[in-house]
């Protein structure tokens, strides 16, 4: 085997250290799954790493949708949709059109959605500007566009002044300038500066945005249309990708286009729409059941239940003096750890106390952003939240007493994540 490149080496070091500590690549040994309690090495722990924010991962009607589909249509429809597919695909897209209000196209995963859309909607005459923190799946997809001749650059995370500077300097050299960002960033839980992005699209007719709102869908907005569409309607210079594998409670990706014409182009030319099989049949059935649920009042009830938990979590964390560094109202909470070493200690000690949380160290997050990511779902009880926050506060207080943690420095290092 060839020598690993330096990026892989860095990732491998992080993964190996975390594996040695027993805090990642864990196995849930439970016989059943309820979204809340996991059994790890024989011990029950409460999950604070589940992204099925509305608890739809265990929803009965969605499970039944999967069972019905497999019973009627078999395990898998083994053909590219380009030739032939189950009409369930179009049924799902019809429901997603109703939810979003635009032209949708489903893909096997969100990553494959970006991979299919980005090389088609961009051209060698365009410039792609990646946000420094945009999800790896978007960055990977731009590599194909780059191989086709499209220039790719990067700006600091959510820095709209730097982005406008690029637009002003480059707008006459390129046909289109694309900014690629997450709607709700998956690790640090901060939203993209959507208002500023809209303003730029209004002011510069050749400025476009590709937004990955994988984590924004379902838990916010009318019919769960997601964070980005809740904030603003889809701009004609914008394309969205969302996920059915997080708040939506199933699996798969959703591309959202402002016109049927662009959707048609990606349907005909998108890599995974041509070269890969469809969304597996039971998953399609589950997605249809979830989409139908999104069009009922149940979605609002679940959103309200989550909202109460988000509010409670925030209040508890602020009261405990924990260094919560993302102040947006989302089910993702990020605590700065001050150092990589502290992050390992906190996650390991939390696991010993019965709570699973996610370790985030470089290169998963930027160098000074080591920390702990906790996500909550409607499966978590208020008591779970109160107990987990108090366990976390005890660990942070201990580190502070030992002189290993300086909260002012943490807030300073994370100052870019202001409320938007
Ligand atoms: C922001 C974001 N985009 C894309 C993905 C990839 O999603 P999928 O597993 O559907 O490819 C993830 C996965 O966690 C994500 O957080």
Image (cartoon, helix red, strand yellow):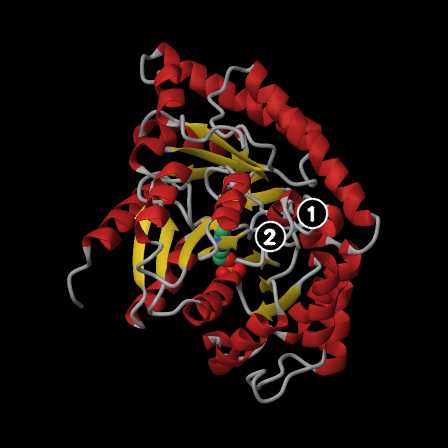
- Mark 1 element type: loop
- Mark 2 element type: loop
Res 256 seen here: yes
Quarter of the picture containing the C terminus is top right
* Residue furthest out toward the left: 3
Judged by depth in the image, the label closer to the viewer, 1 or 2, is 2
Relative to residue 407, is residue 179 depicted above or below? Answer: below
Residue displayed at 54% across by 46% down:
198
Relative to residue 29, is residue 340 depicted above or below? Answer: above
Q: Residue 338 in the image: state x and y as whole percent.
A: 35, 24
Residue displayed at 59% across by 74% down:
261
Q: Are marks 1 and 2 in contact (CB under 8 Å)?
A: no
Q: Residue 394 in the image: state x and y as whole percent.
A: 49, 17
Residue displayed at 69% across by 57% down:
100
The answer to whether the beta carbon of the residue marked 2 is less than 8 Å from any atom of ligand 1 is: yes
Q: CA distance from mark 1 to mark 2?
A: 10 Å
Q: Residue 112 in the image: state x and y as whole percent.
A: 48, 67
Residue displayed at 68% across by 43% down:
220
Q: Residues within 10 Å of mark 2 (few under 14, many from 20)?
A: many
* Residue furthest out toward the right: 297
Q: Residues within 10 Å of mark 1 (few under 14, many from 20)?
A: many
Quarter of the picture containing the N terminus is bottom left
Q: Which residue is mark 1?
A: 55
Instruction: State the residue in front, 296 or 7.
Output: 296
Q: Quadrant of residue 159?
A: top left
Q: Which residue is mark 2?
A: 246
């Amino acid at each position: 085997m060839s020598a690993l490149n330096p990026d892989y080496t860095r990732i491998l070091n992080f993964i190996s250290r975390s594996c040695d500590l027993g805090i990642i690549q864990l196995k849930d040994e439970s016989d059943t799954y309820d979204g809340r309690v996991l059994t790890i090495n024989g011990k029950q722990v409460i999950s604070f790493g589940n992204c099925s924010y509305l608890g739809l991962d265990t929803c009965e009607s969605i499970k039944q949708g999967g069972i019905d589909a497999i019973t009627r249509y078999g395990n898998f429809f083994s053909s590219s949709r380009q030739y032939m597919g189950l009409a369930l695909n179009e049924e799902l897209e019809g429901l997603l059109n109703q939810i979003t209000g635009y032209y949708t196209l489903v893909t096997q995963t969100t990553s494959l959605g970006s991979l299919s859309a980005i090389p088609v909607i961009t051209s060698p005459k365009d410039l792609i500007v990646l946000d420094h923190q945009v999800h790896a799946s978007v960055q990977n997809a731009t590599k194909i566009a780059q191989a086709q001749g499209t220039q790719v650059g990067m700006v600091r995370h959510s820095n709209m002044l730097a982005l406008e500077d690029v637009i002003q300097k480059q707008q006459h050299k390129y046909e289109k300038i694309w900014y690629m960002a997450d709607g709700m960033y998956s690790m640090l839980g901060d939203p993209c500066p959507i208002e500023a992005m809209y303003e730029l699209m209004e002011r510069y007719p050749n400025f476009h945005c590709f937004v990955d709102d994988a984590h924004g869908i379902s838990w916010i907005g009318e019919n769960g249309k997601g964070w980005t569409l809740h904030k603003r309607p889809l701009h004609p210079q914008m394309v969205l990708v969302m996920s059915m594998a997080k708040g939506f409670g199933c699996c798969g990706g959703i591309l959202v286009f402002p016109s049927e014409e662009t959707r048609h182009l990606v349907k005909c030319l998108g890599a995974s729409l041509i070269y890969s099989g469809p969304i597996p049949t039971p998953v399609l059935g589950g997605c249809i059941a979830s989409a139908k649920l999104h069009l009922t009042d149940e979605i609002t009830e679940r959103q309200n239940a989550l909202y109460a938990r988000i509010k409670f979590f925030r209040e508890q964390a602020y009261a405990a003096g924990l260094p919560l560094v993302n102040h947006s109202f989302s089910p993702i909470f990020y605590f700065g750890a001050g150092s990589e070493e502290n992050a390992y200690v906190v996650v390991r000690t939390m696991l010993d106390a019965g709570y699973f949380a996610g370790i985030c160290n470089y290169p998963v997050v930027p160098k000074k952003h080591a920390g702990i990511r906790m996500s909550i779902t409607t499966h978590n009880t208020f008591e779970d939240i109160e107990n987990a926050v108090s366990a976390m506060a005890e660990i942070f207080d201990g580190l502070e007493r030992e002189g290993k943690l300086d909260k002012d420095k943490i807030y300073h290092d994370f100052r870019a994540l202001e409320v938007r």
